[in-house]
Amino acid sequence: MGADLYGQPCRACAFDWRLTPSEAVALVRDVPARFNAALSEATGQERHPDLVWTPCAYVSHVTDNLRTWAERLVSARATGETDVPGYDPDVMARVRNYDQIALAGARWSLDWAAREWAEAVEESLKTNVVMHHATRGLQCAADVARNNAHDAHHHHLYDVERILADAST
């Protein structure tokens, strides 16, 4: 799925889509530490001319994305309802006012979301949860693990690092 969209490995970040679901979970567990290290000297409000969001907005987006997918997995496992809608991350950013969230709060929320997401994915892998996403089609728990690991650990952290590198010049 992800390899079809982004290439194997990912053309932008070299993410290897062949990693195991357990490796993907480990990457997501490490996401808060990686973001914290990257943002240790940042305000979270830095800008890049090619990107719309600030680092704080990216942290908030990763948090919401992990919480959303954890919720979907838990719901599918608990109820058997496997149809899940898509959502527009830009609408979510506006509704939640990502740019007005304090970086300390966003980082705390990311830590919480990554732990809960990992638990939800691990339980869903044990029970072979498969969902039907409105635009992505069938998504098993392993797909969710890989997609979310790519989005968080590679794709969005990469964007934050680009912003911070540009801000330091």
Image (tube, grey):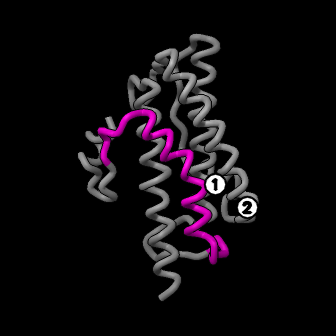
Label 2, label 1: how many angstroms apart (C-alpha)?
8 Å
| Residue, disc 1 | 60
Q: Is residue 135 left or right of residue 100?
A: left
Q: Which of 130 and 134 lies nearest the eye of the viewer?
A: 130
Horizontal and vertical percent position of residue 83: 51, 19
Residue type of the residue flagged with mark 1? Ser
The residues colored magenta run 16-45
Residue at 34% over, 39% down: 19
Neighbor class of circle 1 (other Cα within 10 Å; few <14, some 14-19, many 20+) is many
Looking at the image, which residue sits at the far bottom? 169
Q: Is residue 18 magenta?
A: yes
Residue at 42% over, 33% down: 21
Q: Is residue 4 above or below residue 136?
A: below
Horizontal and vertical percent position of residue 123: 57, 23
Residue at 59% over, 16% down: 77
Neighbor class of circle 2 (other Cα within 10 Å; few <14, some 14-19, many 20+) is some
Sequence-earlier tag: 2 or 1: 1
Residue type of the residue flagged with mark 2? Ile
Q: Is residue 6 above or below residue 20?
A: below
Horizontal and vertical percent position of residue 40: 63, 72
Mark identifier at residue 101: 2
Residues at circles 2 and 1 in contact by the CB criterion of under 8 Å: yes
Q: Is residue 44 magenta?
A: yes
